[in-house]
Image (cartoon, grey):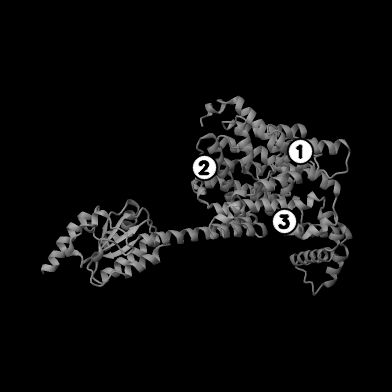
């Protein structure tokens, strides 16, 4: 879209952007809290990603910001880095933001090298299992705040970690002494002296950190659920349940006003107005966001190396998340997005958001749909949504800090329920079992192990199955047959039209091999088996490659081996109808002309038979 077209729909874009910004507010706060960096991180992410992804992206109506999938992965990244930094968020923040910045830069790189157009090839069972896993993860991790239970504040639970806390502190002392060149066994008094300076407060702080780490994530939430059920804060639970009821109930009244925003404003207003003793979210800093430059001051190759793969995983996830939303936008607006440009825009947005301390995001389906329905048609709508959130931050930051944490837990529970792929789940009884297995494998591994690895494993399994199917199809359609049975082949199928009147006198000398479909590494074993069917009496083999649109390196080398084997037996190979891509490869590795001369490559079957007819007759007469 040209710059002048940016203002071609100002009224519609303004209304669409404002509406999408309002819808994004509660979700941005909730995702920020869920990530572990606080509501301000979610809000900063929504502001910068929305504005810059719209400005530089390739989907005119897309609204971007923190999303459920990106937050779920970010939550694991944040928890892991904080845990590696002794539970100190401030200490861990530079590394966390470095990962987010790297993922943004990698997204730009993915767009520049043209990866965007390949995202659409991800199999549906993998996407379905992944999206359902995201929903399950959000639901499970929100059980504790919904019940008003926070493990770090449970004194009895924290006390169980004090022995381990003492071990951790002692280990730190031993490492300090090792760094100073002190040999513990020779100077044990120094160790005792340092240990005596440890206060109960230090032990308690370390125990709190260990308790928080133990209760984090899906497995931690499940382990902590019994403690939560025996320590329910009924006020928090009621606030959460009312929020959920309003979100679902208000939709039945009208969809003109976002029910999530209504629930946020109504429940928060009542809780604050009546002075209820609820737990508020973390304070949102007032004023314009300030760049967090600590990542650059502490930057070194050694500090980022462990997180490169993590950043790449986030980049790919953001790419998938965004481009799936772009497809939805295309279907609604009857337009066509530019996938690689969209990745560049998303990468720029995520990079700038990281510099300002925001969590990463992607194209958001719900917000994009709201924008389109409200009249948004150009990139201006996404930029306005970002500006809208910035104005809310500057004007209402202190007010937003009074929102009950239980309200955001209720919002996230509805997000978790909504993000699951019910279409895929309902189809389980009717789809092939292997696709169901892929979906379940991705779902289980995502929830209980690692989201990105789960998707990778799902892709590998799906690819192997696809290759097996393609190999089976190609093998069933590819034929090697003697001309003694030319009316029909071994499967009872009719011959190709130009072979019906094949000269009878050539049947003993010539065999024809039909190849249908792509010849790739999933088909090599079948290709070798077909070659073994050629009897010793043959002196010439015709490879019919009219219907081979594609050949990979494995298929090409297998074909080369077959031709070499035939040549050693005195059987000459001729090719008919080879297409552009296979021909290019065959010439590149010198199958043509080293093994098969140029004059043995024919455009049509009749030319080949005319050539071979003369050769066979000369051989017979001699």
- Quadrant of the image occupied by residue 223: bottom right
* Label 3 – label 1 distance at C-alpha: 26 Å
Answer above or below: position of 111 versus 621. above
- Given residues 282 and 435, the one toward you in this image is 435
- Sequence-wise first label, 2 or 3: 3
Q: Secondary structure at mark 2?
A: helix
10 in relation to 563, above or below: above
Residue 412 in the image: x percent, y percent?
72, 46
First in residue order: circle 3 vs circle 1 = 3
Question: Residue 217 got which mark?
Answer: 3
The disc placed on residue 580 is none
Residue at mark 2 to residue at mark 1: CA–CA distance? 35 Å
Q: Nearer the viewer, mark 3 or mark 1?
A: 1
**Within 10 Å of the Cα at label 3, are there few (<14), some (14-19), or many (20+) other Cα atoms?**
many
Residue at horizontal 65 percent and vertical 38 percent from the top: 48
Q: Are marks 3 and 1 in contact (CB under 8 Å)?
A: no
Whichever of labels 2 and 1 marks the residue nearer the N terminus, that label is 1
Categorize mark 1 by other alpha carbons within 10 Å: few (<14), some (14-19), many (20+). many
Question: Where is mark 1, residue-wise?
Answer: 263
């Amino acid at each position: 879209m040209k710059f002048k077209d940016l203002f071609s729909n100002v009224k519609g874009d303004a209304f669409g952007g404002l509406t999408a910004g309002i819808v994004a507010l509660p979700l941005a706060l909730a995702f920020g809290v869920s990530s572990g960096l606080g509501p301000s991180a979610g809000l900063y992410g929504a502001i910068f990603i929305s504005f810059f992804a719209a400005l530089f992206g390739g989907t005119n109506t897309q609204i971007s910001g923190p999303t459920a999938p990106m937050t779920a992965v970010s939550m694991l990244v944040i928890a892991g880095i904080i845990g590696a930094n002794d539970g100190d968020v401030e200490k861990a923040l530079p590394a966390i933001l470095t990962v987010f910045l790297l993922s943004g830069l990698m997204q730009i790189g993915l767009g520049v090298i043209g990866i965007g157009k390949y995202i659409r090839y991800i199999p549906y069972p993998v996407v379905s299992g992944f999206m359902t896993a995201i929903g399950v993860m959000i639901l499970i991790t929100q059980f504790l705040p919904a019940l008003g239970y926070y493990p770090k504040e449970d004194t009895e639970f924290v006390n169980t970690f004090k022995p381990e806390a003492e071990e951790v502190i002692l280990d730190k002392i031993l490492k300090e002494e090792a760094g100073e060149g002190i040999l513990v066994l020779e100077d044990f008094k120094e160790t005792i002296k340092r240990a005596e300076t440890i206060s109960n407060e230090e032990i308690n702080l370390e125990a709190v950190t260990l308790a928080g780490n133990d209760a984090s994530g899906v497995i931690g939430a499940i382990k902590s659920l019994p403690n939560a059920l025996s320590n329910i804060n009924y006020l928090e639970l009621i606030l959460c349940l009312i929020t959920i009821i309003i979100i679902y109930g208000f939709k039945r009244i009208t969809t003109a006003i976002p029910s999530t925003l209504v629930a946020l404003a109504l429940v928060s207003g009542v809780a604050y107005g009546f002075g209820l003793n609820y737990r508020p979210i973390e304070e949102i800093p007032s004023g314009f966001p300030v760049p967090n430059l600590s990542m650059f001051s502490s930057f070194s190759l050694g500090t980022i190396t462990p997180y490169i793969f993590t950043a790449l995983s986030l980049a790919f996830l953001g790419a998938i998340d965004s481009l799936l939303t772009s497809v939805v936008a295309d279907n609604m607006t009857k337009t066509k997005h530019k996938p690689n440009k969209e990745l560049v825009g998303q990468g720029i947005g995520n990079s700038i958001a990281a510099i300002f301390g925001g969590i990463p995001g992607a194209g958001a389906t719900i917000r994009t749909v709201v924008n389109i329905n409200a009249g948004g048609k150009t990139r201006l709508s996404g930029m306005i949504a970002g500006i809208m959130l910035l104005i809310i931050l500057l004007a209402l930051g202190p007010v937003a800090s009074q929102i009950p944490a239980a309200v955001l837990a209720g919002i996230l529970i509805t997000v978790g329920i909504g993000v699951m792929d019910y279409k895929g789940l309902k189809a389980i009884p009717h789809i092939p079992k292997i696709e169901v297995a892929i979906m379940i494998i991705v779902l289980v591994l995502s929830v209980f192990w690692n989201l990105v690895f789960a998707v990778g494993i799902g892709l590998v399994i799906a690819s192997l199955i696809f290759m097996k199917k393609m190999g089976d199809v190609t093998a069933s359609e590819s034929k090697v047959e003697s001309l003694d049975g030319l009316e029909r082949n071994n499967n009872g199928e009719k011959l190709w039209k130009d072979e019906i009147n094949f000269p009878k006198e050539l049947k003993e000398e010539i065999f024809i091999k039909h190849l249908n479909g792509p010849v790739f590494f999933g088909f090599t074993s079948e290709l070798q088996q077909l070659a073994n069917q050629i009897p010793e009496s043959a002196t010439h083999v015709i490879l019919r490659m009219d219907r081979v649109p594609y050949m990979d390196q494995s298929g090409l080398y297998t074909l080369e081996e077959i031709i070499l084997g035939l040549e050693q037996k005195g059987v000459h190979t001729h090719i008919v109808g080879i297409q552009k891509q296979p021909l290019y490869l065959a010439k590149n590795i010198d199958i043509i002309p080293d093994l098969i001369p140029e004059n043995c490559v024919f455009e049509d079957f009749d030319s080949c038979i005319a050539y071979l007819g003369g050769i066979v007759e000369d051989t017979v007469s001699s």
